[in-house]
Image (tube, rainbow, N blue to C red):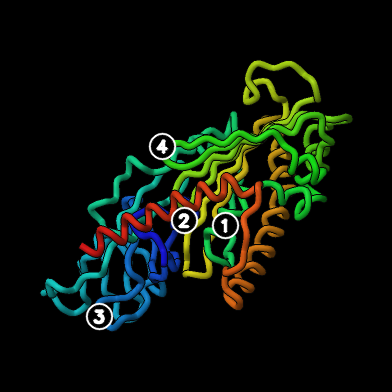
Amino acid sequence: MLLRNAWYIAAWADELRGEQPLARRICNEPIVLFRDGGGRVGALADRCCHRAAPLSMGTVVAEGIQCGYHGLIINRSGACVHIPGQRQIPEDARVRSYPVGEKDQLVWIWTGEPAQADPATLVDFPYHNDPKTWPNRHDVYPIKAHYMLMVDNLMDLTHLGYLHARTVGGNPAAHVDAEMKTVRTPTGVKFTRWMRNSLPPPSYVKAAGFTGRVDRCQEFEFVAPSTVLQWTGAIEAGTAFADPERDFRFQFRLFHGLTPETDTSCYYFWSVANGYRQDDPSATEQLYQEIAPTFVEDRVMVEAQQARISELGEAGLVDIASDTARMQMRRIGERLMAKELAVAAK
């Protein structure tokens, strides 16, 4: 079962352009996304109200989206505004529309009760809008696994030293023995990890030219139900500093957004923002190229997990010490789902 009264990412803003609409399945529902002639985003059920043709096979026009089968035009509110060959438009010639919000280069969608969709609760990530200070690149990966398996992966970094040993991981013991502080936030959970006097992973050496040991810091914030905001930095071991995010000469930010496609598949929207050598475009590209393979490794692993869970279930699985933040995060999700089910049962 999927939580519906929540904002999920539907697309990167730059995915919606031109005459080609974008088809996505979100929370098991076929949806078509587009921009009308005024640049406003529309999200509709991907089914024409005439003969059920997928609207995603149509064309974006000024008024909305034109069905590719018989030419009906549906605007972003879901109303049919044009039928070729007739002036009278039936009142029930409508398509379901979904609340959307656009912020920080992301398009969000709400598949639950429309009245509960509050744009003020959209996640903040202003770094996408500051290419001078935080030059960035973004991507989206389809993953054949439940979206929370990927969120679990992001909120437990002890796997880095094993699954990502050749890239951003480094020594496994440094991750397992990291200084860890976890706190609750109004919207989720946040943890900070320090790996002091550790060997820098290969990607850090390539990016910043470290020649000796470093002090590494990672901050991860889970924003319910499926967003993770990350800051990572490194500095020569033992260097004095007042504020890691200001004084660390090597740092970057990652945005992670997971959107359920079905009960066993999701979309992984991610971006990397470079906080060092910002005037050098090659640094941002190199950082992207170093990080992207780690997320492919994550995808392979969580897809393998999903295959085993689908086959054998979750009975018998145990939690270990490194699952502390993940367990808190899961409990938040369970409470949100219980609240939604309770309201629906009234």
- Disc on the earlier residue, 4 or 2: 2
x and y, in percent, of residue 207 in the image: 78, 37
**What quarter of the picture does the N terminus occupy?**
bottom left
- The residue singled out by tag 1 in the image is 140
Q: How far apart are marks 3 and 2 (CA)?
A: 27 Å
- Disc on the earlier residue, 1 or 4: 1
Residue 80 vertical placement versus 105 (above, below): below
Mark 4 and 2 residues: CB-CB less than 8 Å, in contact? no
The residue under label 4 is which amino acid type?
Pro
The residue under label 1 is which amino acid type?
Val
- Disc on the earlier residue, 3 or 1: 3
- The residue singled out by tag 4 in the image is 186
Crowd tier of the residue under label 2, counting other residues whose Cα lies within 10 Å: few below 14, some 14–19, many 20 or above: many
The residue under label 2 is which amino acid type?
Ala
- The residue singled out by tag 3 in the image is 50
In this view, the mark in front (4 or 2):
4
Q: Is residue 15 left or right of residue 177?
A: left
Mark 2 and 1 residues: CB-CB less than 8 Å, in contact? yes
Q: Is residue 98 left or right of residue 150?
A: left
